[in-house]
């Protein structure tokens, strides 16, 4: 009989982490998902001691300070400092404890702002970063490179990094000061419907493009990666392979929510990258593709939003 394998999931109460926990429910994996209050990842000694005691077979590192464009602009110090320290602590503790397998989560903000789309993994560190989330991106780049250096020293690919595109889904954050685009639209359009408002504001002119994947699909990718770690590429984008304009996302949410008003454009708001579409060549070669359509994903996210309002 084979030994039950143990996974440590950081950020297990966050959006990605909660979707991963739901995906793992009923599986053979023994899951360790310490909450922020159980284990503060800013505390290097605590992380070191935790790994020395628990010795997981694999770590999914999904914790961090995460937020939309406005939160990143408002708090560059925290986004750089906290993510740098958390990334360093988790990866170095895993290195020192000789943990065999780790999956580190980066983000498409690691790509240069002027790189040609679709963005392929070999474009990393070839140009200037997008200023609206530069601090966050520098922290993510540090963690990505640290994983690659561990692999170089060990002579094998033990610590792998995935680069998800923008994500949304159940367990998302809907607070306008922190939220990413899709939860922000759900919150705005739901309230417009509730209050009988005829107009909703879109930040910017709405022509910027984003690739938003349903977080349940990322959990599905990670589940496959856990069970096929050896074939998972050392560094790979994870995404849809196509994108939509900001205006398209507003229209899609309005349809799901059932609101029929009009949109105006607030040109004083930050827009960030004009486009950040990740190449899906590596993930496709690995044999994986997301399954959730934009409409289904928005519907599930809206249902979750309504559940949280009623709690
Ligand atoms: N959301 C997105 O669009 C994208 C996310 N990613 C990456 O995916 C990962 C998960 O993101 P997501 O789930 O959206 O983010 P969330 O903010 O939903 O979750 C992050 C989690 O990290 C925890 N955390 C933060 N600081 C600490 C700490 N000091 N010690 C312990 N736990 C801590 C948070 O706990 P608490 O809330 O209690 O502080 C929270 O549970 C991140 O690495 C992110 O960069 C990549 C691409 C896109
Ligand atoms: C995942 C990625 O996410 C962040 O980058 P971002 O993609 O720019 O983030 P966003 O989801 O907040 O915005 C996407 C687009 O949407 C437009 N937009 C319109 N109207 C609203 C609106 O009401 N709210 C928000 N937030 N955006 C809006 C907004 O102007 C922008 O053009 C990084 O900071 C970092 O976290 C990171 O790596």
Image (spheres, rainbow, N blue to C red):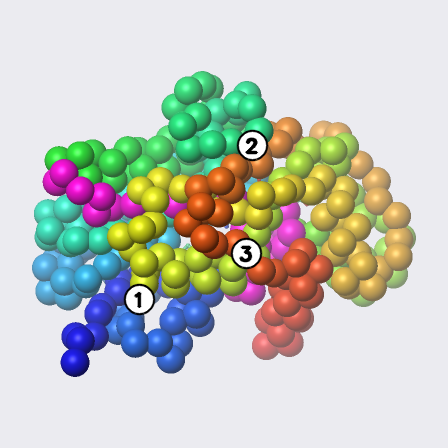
Quadrant of the rendering where the C terminus is positioned:
bottom right
Q: Badge 3, how many Cα within 10 Å: few under 14, some, many 20+? A: some
- Which residue, given by chain and number where applicable, does mark 1 sit on? 33
Nearest to N terminus: mark 1 or mark 2: 1
- Which residue, given by chain and number where applicable, does mark 2 sit on? 118
Nearest to N terminus: mark 2 or mark 3: 2
**Mark linked to residue 290:** 3
Taking 3 as reference, is 60 above or below it?
above
Q: Is residue 226 left or right of residue 209?
A: left
* Label 1 secondary element: loop
Q: Residue at x 42, y 20 (%)?
A: 126
Q: Residue at x 84, y 44 (%)?
A: 263
Q: Is residue 227 left or right of residue 254?
A: left
Q: Is residue 245 left or right of residue 65?
A: right
Residue 233 x, y percent position in the rendering:
34, 44
Quadrant of the rendering where the N terminus is positioned:
bottom left
Q: Residue at x 29, y 72 (%)?
A: 29
**Mark linked to residue 23:** none
Q: Badge 1, how many Cα within 10 Å: few under 14, some, many 20+? A: many
Q: Quadrant of ligand 2?
A: top right
Residue 232 x, y percent position in the rendering:
34, 50
Write down the region rendered in magenta. 154-183
Residue 280 x, y percent position in the rendering:
51, 42
Marks 1/2: CA–CA distance: 34 Å
């Amino acid at each position: 009989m084979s030994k039950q394998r143990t996974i440590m999931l950081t950020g297990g109460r966050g959006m990605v982490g909660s979707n991963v926990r739901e995906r793992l429910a009923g599986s053979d994996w023994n899951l360790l998902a310490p909450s922020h209050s159980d284990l503060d990842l800013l505390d290097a000694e605590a992380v070191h001691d935790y790994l020395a005691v628990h010795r997981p077979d694999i770590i999914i590192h999904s914790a961090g300070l995460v937020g939309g464009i406005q939160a990143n602009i408002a708090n560059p110090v925290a986004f750089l400092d906290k993510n740098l320290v958390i990334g360093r602590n988790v990866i170095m503790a895993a290195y020192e404890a000789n943990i065999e397998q780790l999956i580190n989560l980066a983000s498409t903000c690691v790509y240069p702002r002027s790189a040609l789309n679709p963005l392929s993994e070999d474009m990393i560190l070839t140009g200037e970063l997008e200023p609206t989330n530069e601090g966050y991106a520098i922290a993510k780049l540090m963690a990505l490179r640290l994983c690659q250096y561990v692999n170089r020293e060990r002579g094998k690919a033990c610590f792998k990094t995935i680069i998800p595109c923008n994500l949304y889904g159940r367990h998302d954050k809907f607070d306008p000061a922190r939220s990413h685009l899709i939860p922000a639209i759900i919150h705005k359009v739901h309230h417009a419907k509730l209050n009988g408002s005829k107009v909703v504001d879109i930040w910017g002119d709405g022509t910027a493009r984003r690739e938003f994947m349903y977080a349940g699909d990322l959990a599905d990718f990670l589940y496959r990666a856990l069970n096929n770690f050896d074939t998972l590429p050392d560094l790979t984008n994870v995404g849809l392979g196509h994108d939509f304009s900001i205006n398209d996302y507003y229209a899609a949410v309005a349809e799901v929510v059932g609101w029929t008003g009009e949109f105006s454009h607030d040109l004083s708001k930050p827009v960030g990258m004009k486009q950040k579409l990740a190449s899906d060549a590596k993930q496709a070669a690995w044999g994986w593709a997301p399954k959730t359509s934009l409409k289904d994903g928005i519907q599930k996210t809206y249902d979750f939003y309504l559940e949280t309002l009623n709690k």
